[in-house]
Image (cartoon, rainbow, N blue to C red):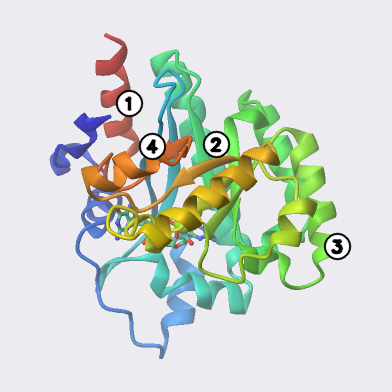
């Protein structure tokens, strides 16, 4: 997947996505809080959101390409706004339901398109917030959408953070079980940054655990961090959960992640977030 490091050909991309891909490198400053919620509310309708896709590389099986869908907001004045600047607001005011629904459908449509265009069993991971998971209506509508476009739920992985399970964990485990039974993969994001609640690992129906970049980055130089990662990987594997090393930026980090038994790796070393069109070009070159 090293081709992923080529620069983005912005000419051929829709404006929102081209700027979004650029936004993966240079972060815009956070918009001023005043008036920002109102603008966010209309952003979906005005078509200002775009998705970029970052490769999640298997350490063993290059034939099963996987990507994480990452949201970008192309603000008409501020330019590309990174999700860290607006997701928390959208979660607080409930807009995440509409935004998350748009993300789910756009990622599913792109996954279907990429599967058709390349003939490969492409999988896409979608970040979901607690509020979305709590909605039974959302699950019904998502499954209906997948049925409409002819995409199996197995093609999609839902990425959740530990925060999702911090309130009413029993309800959340039940929602996650329903999603897992429907066929979605379930991935625990940013592991190692929150409480890293081990009991929760025993309850949640997880397929993947993502070791946060703050841990991965320390692996080459810190025996202590390597010991932690080795123990987490062993624990996850005992539970039948595969491990993704996130935020891999350098070859030494990639080597260490592989040596410690991580099943997948993600980060700038493997590929920057890119447009769906770029993903298609890369995959087509790889199978040619
Ligand atoms: P995340 O899900 O952990 O996504 C990984 C973040 O790390 C992405 O930032 C990605 O661009 C960045 N990244 C990837 N490789 C590297 C690397 O090698 N080094 C460094 N320093 N960073 C790397 P991004 O796209 O800004 O997303 C930030 C967070 O925003 C995501 O973290 C996720 O929690 C949230 N987010 C993104 N899209 C969505 C969405 O559609 N829905 C929801 N609910 N949250 C989203
Ligand atoms: Mg994620
Ligand atoms: Mg993460």
Q: Is residue 30 above or below residue 248?
A: below
Dot 1 or dot 3, earlier in sequence: 3
Quadrant of the rendered image holding ligand 1: bottom left
Tell us which disc is closer to us: 2 or 3.
Answer: 3
- On the image, the x and y values in percent for residue 62 come to 39, 21
Residue 177 image point, x, y percent: 81, 45
Q: Are marks 1 and 3 in contact (CB under 8 Å)?
A: no
- Measure how far apart labels 1 and 3 are at the Cα level: 40 Å
What residue sits right under mark 4 in the picture?
Answer: 258
Label 2, label 3: how far apart the Cα atoms are:
28 Å
List the residue tagged with mark 1: 280
Q: Which residue is under mark 2?
A: 108
Q: CA distance from mark 4 to mark 3?
A: 34 Å
Quadrant occupied by the N terminus: top left
Q: Residue at x 72, y 32 (%)?
A: 183
Question: Considering only order in the chain, which callout, 3 or 2, is on the residue closer to the N terminus?
Answer: 2
Looking at the image, tell me whether mark 1 or mark 2 is earlier in sequence order. Answer: 2
Whether residue 273 appears in this view of the structure is: no
Q: Secondary structure at mark 4?
A: helix
Q: Residue at 38% x, 55% y: name it.
A: 216
The residue tagged 3 is 170
Local SS, label 2: helix
Give the Cα distance between marks 1 and 2: 15 Å
């Amino acid at each position: 997947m090293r081709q992923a490091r080529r620069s983005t050909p912005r000419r051929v991309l829709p404006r929102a996505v081209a700027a979004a891909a650029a936004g993966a490198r240079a972060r815009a400053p956070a918009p001023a809080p005043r008036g920002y919620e109102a603008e966010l509310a209309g952003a979906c309708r005005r078509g200002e959101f775009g998705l970029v896709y970052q490769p999640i590389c298997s350490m063993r099986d290059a034939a099963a390409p996987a990507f994480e869908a990452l949201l970008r907001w192309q603000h008409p004045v501020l330019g590309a706004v990174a999700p860290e600047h607006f997701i928390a607001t959208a979660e607080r005011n409930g807009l995440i339901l509409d935004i998350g629904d748009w993300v789910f459908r756009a990622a599913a449509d792109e996954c279907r398109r990429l599967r058709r265009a390349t003939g490969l069993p492409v999988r896409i991971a979608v970040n979901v917030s607690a509020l979305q998971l709590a909605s039974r209506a959302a699950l019904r509508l998502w499954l209906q959408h997948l049925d409409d476009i002819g995409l199996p739920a197995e093609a999609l992985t839902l990425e959740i953070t530990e925060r999702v399970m911090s309130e009413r964990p029993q309800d959340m485990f039940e929602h996650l079980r329903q999603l897992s039974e429907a066929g979605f993969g379930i991935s625990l994001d940013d592991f190692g940054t929150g409480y890293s609640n081990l009991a929760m690992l025993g309850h949640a129906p997880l397929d993947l655990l993502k070791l946060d970049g703050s841990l991965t980055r320390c692996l080459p130089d810190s025996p202590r961090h390597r010991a932690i990662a080795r123990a987490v990987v062993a624990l996850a594997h005992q539970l039948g959960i595969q491990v993704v090393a996130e935020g891999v930026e350098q070859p030494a980090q990639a080597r260490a992640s592989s040596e410690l038994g991580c099943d997948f790796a993600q980060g700038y070393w493997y590929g920057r977030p890119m447009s769906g069109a770029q993903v298609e070009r890369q995959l087509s070159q790889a199978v040619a």
